[in-house]
Image (cartoon, rainbow, N blue to C red):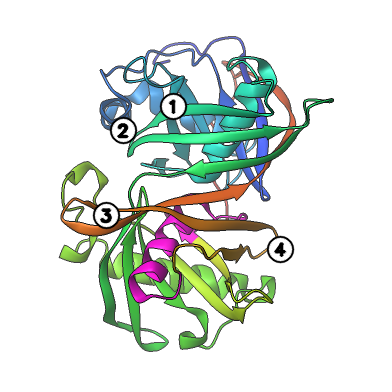
Amino acid sequence: MAGPHPSTISTVDYHTGGEPFRIVSEPPVAIEGATVAERRVIAIADPDVDRLRKLLCSEPRGHADMYGGFITPPDDEGADFGVLFWHKDGFSTACGHGSMALAAWAVQTGRVERDPSGTTTVVIDVPSGRVTLRVRTDSGSGKVTGIDFVSVPSYRLAGQVSLATSRGEVAVDIAYGGAIYAHLAASAVGLAVTPDHYNHLIAIGREVKWALNDTDYARHPADDRLSGIYGAIVYDDLGADADGNPHQRNVAVFAEGQVDRSPCGSGTCSRVAVLAATGALKPGQTLVHDSIVGSRFTARIAGELTADGHQAVIPEVTGTAYRTGEHRFGLDPDDELGTGFVLR
């Protein structure tokens, strides 16, 4: 890609809870590395891979909140394939909504054979580890009716960390769910997770992320490749539903001010870890987790264990994904805008 771009780059696009995911099943550049985690580190420094990311993510082919992934080989025969996740600012360690989209795509395209029982298991290697998805399909039509995302062990790293912000002193929880998030109650800064507060939510989310990103709170205890505050989860506590389950609404502000339209897959895993640590979510209960656009995931504690020296849980997040279309992108060699731009 340092020279001419391929004449066409084919993608299949999905959305999960309103959040886009652009799948590149055959990346036209080599993505080196023995594992997906290694490929991510190498891709960050590889100008050819990064140019491909920019071409597909930036305007006019994408937008400031675009998301996608390059399919890679799995780390070993225990997974169906691997994926390198990307967004407008680089390559992420985890992506639950993208994993759900990939699982739907894998079953719908036949990459993973549909189980006649109606529940097909799809195993994907991602930079933070190996995740398992269960795709439920209608026995007659084969239509995807739901997807369970079983994530990596997740745990709270720090509780109620005091932080000075432009909106006053706040307390945040920090937790790992495949990526590290800071968790802040919207009410603590005079906001609510609603579209009319969108710009203010982005501003406080960015502020919290960057205030903590280079601190010890942002260090992963076992793998420094996973360090750094990936994003801020700003949430509303909506009380309990009719069955006594916690009901919350959140917006994940990640990377450099990017907003997840879905309830955020890895963010929901991180949220489960915080709620489990505080006793607000117990085994047998379900977290009802809404997004800023009204879409919903549900989540539960699928297991408890010790991981990386922390009391951890295995979160299981349920949602679904829908195909939105296909693209055949190209780059005219005379195009002065090249791989594009980002304008927010």
SS of the residue under disc 2: helix
Amino acid type at image mark 4: Gly
User: Could you say which quadrant of the image residue 25 lies in?
Assistant: top right
> Is residue 307 shown above or below 34?
below
For the residue pair 317 and 324, the one nearer the viewer reads as 317
Image quadrant occupied by the C terminus: bottom right
Q: Marks 2 and 1: in contact by CB < 8 Å?
A: no
Q: Which residue range is magenta in the image?
A: 253-281
In 3D space, how far apart are the residues under numbered discs 4 and 1 (Cα atoms)? 34 Å
Mark sitting on residue 294: 4
**What residue is disc 1 on?**
51
Quick one: label 4 or label 2, which is nearer the N terminus? 2
**Residue depth check, mark 4 versus mark 1: number of the one nearer the observer:** 4
Q: Position of residue 106 (x, y in %)?
A: 60, 22
For the residue pair 53 and 18, the one nearer the viewer reads as 18
Q: Amino acid at mark 2?
A: Ile
Labels 3 and 2: the sequence-earlier one: 2
Q: Which SS class for mark 4?
A: loop
Foreground: disc 4 or disc 2: 4
Q: Is residue 204 among the parts visible in the rendering?
A: yes
Residue underneath mark 3: 228
Please state the horizontal and vertical placement of residue 66, each as a whole percent of the image. Answer: 58, 43
Say which residue appears at 68% left-offset and 50% top-offset. 18
